[in-house]
Image (cartoon, rainbow, N blue to C red):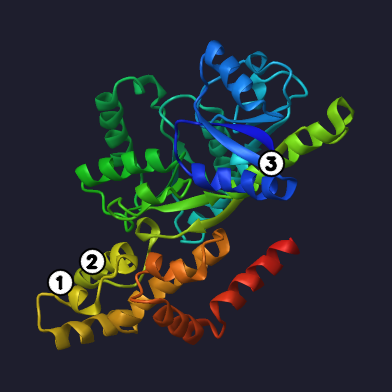
Amino acid sequence: MNVVLYFQSQSKTNALEKLAGVQEVAAKLNWLVQPVEGIPPPAQMHQLFDFWNPIGVIVECGGTAAVINPAVFGTLPIVFFDHDPSCLPKNTFCVTHDSAATGRMAARELMMDGITAFAFVPYPERRFWSDERERGFTDALRINGHTCRVFSGHGSASDPTLHQRELRAFLAGLPKPCALFAANDKTATEVLTAAAITAIPIPTALAVVGVDNAEEICEHSIPTLTSVKPDFREGGRLAAFLLEVQLRNGADFAGPRRRTFGPLRVVRRASTRRTAIHDRIVSDALELIRREACQGITAATVLKSFPCARRQAEIRFRKATGHSVLEEIHAVRIKRAKQLLEDSTMPLKVISDFCGFANPNSLRKQFRKETGLTLSEWRAQGASLKGRR
C-alpha cells in the first residue's frame, strides 16, 4: 500500500476533520495516511522518509508563521494545507481556507440581528487569515452602509495582561448594542472574558461571533459561543486531490495549484441569541439546556434551577418559550444528531450516545417524530444534496 505522510499542526483545532477529508480520498486511492506531529528536524525527516518510503506529503501547517522550507521535503510531491500562500514558492500546490468569505458570512449573520454598530477583533499576532477575515467582514459591512471599529492590539500580543486591559477599554468604548466578529474562537473567548469583567451583557449589549467552531471552546464558554464553521473536511479532500494530480500528471498539471475551501455554516449559540425572552431565570435555563442536553440532563434537573415549585417552573418556561423544557432538550439533541449525520461517518448506533439519548431506539423514535425521516434517510438525503452542489 502506498504511504502518504500527513504532517499535522500541533494546533489541534479541527485536526480530525481535516485529516478525515484526506482519508476519505485516500481510501479510494488505496493510500495509507500516516500522521506526523509537527515538522521534525532534517535528520529525523530523513529517517521518516527511509522508514515509510512515502509517495508524497501533505503539510497541514495550522497557525504557523512562514518558517516551513519546502526544500526539507526533497523531491517528493507536496501539498501545503493552510499555509500563507505568499510565503511559498510560485506554483506550489496549496489549499487554504477562504477567510474573506468567512468574514462575509459573519457580517451577514450579525446584520440580520438588526444591529447597526460593528467591531472586529483580530488575532493578537499578525496572521494572513486574520487579515483576510477582517477585510471580508469590513467590506461586506461597507457595501451595506455600515462602518466597523477594529481593535488594534497587535502591539500588546506579547503581554497577555496588557492585551486584555486594552481589549476591555476597546469594548467599553463601543456603541451599544454592538455586533463583534473575532478572528477565531480563541480570540472570541478573550472578548467574552473582557466583556464579563467590564459588565457588558452578552448578547443584549454585545453579540459575539468567532471562527472554527472548536466545540471544546464554544460549548464551554460563558455564554456559549456562536461560531462560523469552515468546511475543514472539504479542505482535506482538496489537499488529497492536489497530491493525487501531482502523482498522476507531475509538472504537466495545467489546473490551478491553489485551491480554497469556504465556510460551511454558522453554528448559533448563546453569544448571539437575541430573543424576546426577558425572564432571566428562563434564559439561564435555556443556556443550561444548550450546554448539557447532549450530556444527558433531564427536565427535572433543569426545573430544579427555578426558585419555585416544579409545576410553576414548567408554566413559567412554557410561557416564555412556547414549549416545554423536555421539548427544548429534545430540540437541542435532534439538532446535534443532524450535525453528526451530516458531518461524520459515525455509525448510527453510536450517535445516540453523543446526543444524550438513553438508547438508540429513543433517538430513532424522537428523530422520526421531529423530521418525518429515519436516521438513515436523513443521512442519505444530506449526501445527495452535497453531491449536487
Q: Look at the image and tell me in which quarter the C terminus lies.
A: bottom right
Q: Are marks 2 and 1 in contact (CB under 8 Å)?
A: yes
Amino acid type of disc 3? Trp
Structural crowding at the residue carrying mark 1, measured as other residues with C-alpha within 10 Å and reported as few (<14), some (14–19) or many (≥20):
some
Left or right: 20 as drawn, with respect to 155: right
* Lower sequence index among marks 2 and 1: 2
Locate residue 137: give its quadrant. Answer: top right
- Residue 45 shows up from this direction: yes
Picture coordinates of residue 231, whole percent (x, y): 59, 50
Residue 31: give its label.
3
Question: For the residues marked 2 and 3, what is the alpha-carbon distance in whole angstroms?
Answer: 49 Å
Locate residue 284: give its quadrant. Answer: bottom left
Q: Are marks 3 and 1 in contact (CB under 8 Å)?
A: no
Left or right: 118 as drawn, with respect to 321: right
* Lower sequence index among marks 2 and 3: 3
Q: Write down the residue under mark 1.
A: 305
Q: Look at the image and tell me in which quarter the N terminus lies.
A: top right
Residue found 38% across the figure and 39% down from its top:
186
Question: For the residues marked 2 and 1, what is the alpha-carbon distance in whole angstroms?
Answer: 9 Å
Front position among marks 2 and 3: 3
Residue found 50% across the figure and 31% down from its top:
9
Picture coordinates of residue 135, whole percent (x, y): 58, 36
Question: For the residues marked 3 and 1, what is the alpha-carbon distance in whole angstroms?
Answer: 53 Å
User: Is 370 placed above or below 55 here?
Assistant: below
Front position among marks 3 and 1: 3
Structural crowding at the residue carrying mark 3, measured as other residues with C-alpha within 10 Å and reported as few (<14), some (14–19) or many (≥20):
some
Element class at badge 3: strand
Residue found 15% across the figure and 71% down from its top:
305
Residue 284: give its label.
2
Q: Nearer the viewer, residue 234 or 264?
A: 234
